[in-house]
Amino acid sequence: AAAQAMQPLLQAVVQAESPADRLIHLFAALSSLAQRTPRRQLASLRFQPSRDREGEERMQRVYRHVLDHLREPLPLAQVARVAGLSREGFSRYFKRTTGRWFSDFLVELRVQESRRLLVETDGRVADIAFASGFGTLAHFNRRFRALTGRTPRQYRMDYRASVQPAPETVMSTSGSKT
């Protein structure tokens, strides 16, 4: 029941257009969770999370490599070498560590980069797709729409419409608004 109640609140966080709106929606979701009763303890007081320094360093190397090469092709074998694992071992390790597949993670980062470019530049959608690391425009459009619910062009138009100031009301000489 709590998960179903949280769904719209978390969806609002994801769909918020600006960082400030995302933060507001996140606080609303956290507030809703804090007010829920009954609560249940998820771990004993003696629970100590493991500190896997080697694993943390491995993931930091992977994240750094991915961010440094986001706009380039990033074959799984290349990223696995950075992690010091085989392709299969890295794939399982990444899924176990993050809860998602590496390819999904990479696409999400690239879509995030393309969203930034769409709102911060006037570049053509095709140029933004390639600058974000997508190999084809069709793949970019398909993945962008799957993650945002809109086409890249519609996303840009919606963003620009949301940040445009409302037209000012002009006062005529008779004192009435026009």
Image: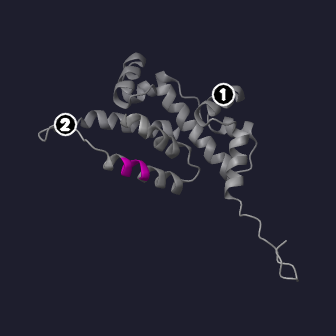
Give the vertical position of 52 relative to 35 (above or below).
Answer: above
How is the structure coloured here? one colour
Residue 112, how many percent across, how many down?
A: 57, 41
Name the amino acid type tagged 1: Arg
- Classify residue 73 as left or right of residue 100: right
- Which of the two residues, 66 or 29, is positioned nearer the viewer here? 29
Q: In the rendered image, which quarter is residue 125 located in?
A: top right
Q: Earlier in the sequence, mark 1 or mark 2?
A: 2
Name the amino acid type tagged 2: Ala
Q: Label 2, secondary structure: give it.
A: loop
- Residue that protrudes farthest toward the right in the picture: 173
Residue 120, how many percent across, how many down?
A: 66, 52
Say which residue appears at 66% left-offset and 39% top-offset.
131
Q: In the rendered image, which quarter is residue 63 located in?
A: top left
Which SS does the magenta portion mostly show? helix
What residue sits right under mark 2 in the picture? Answer: 43
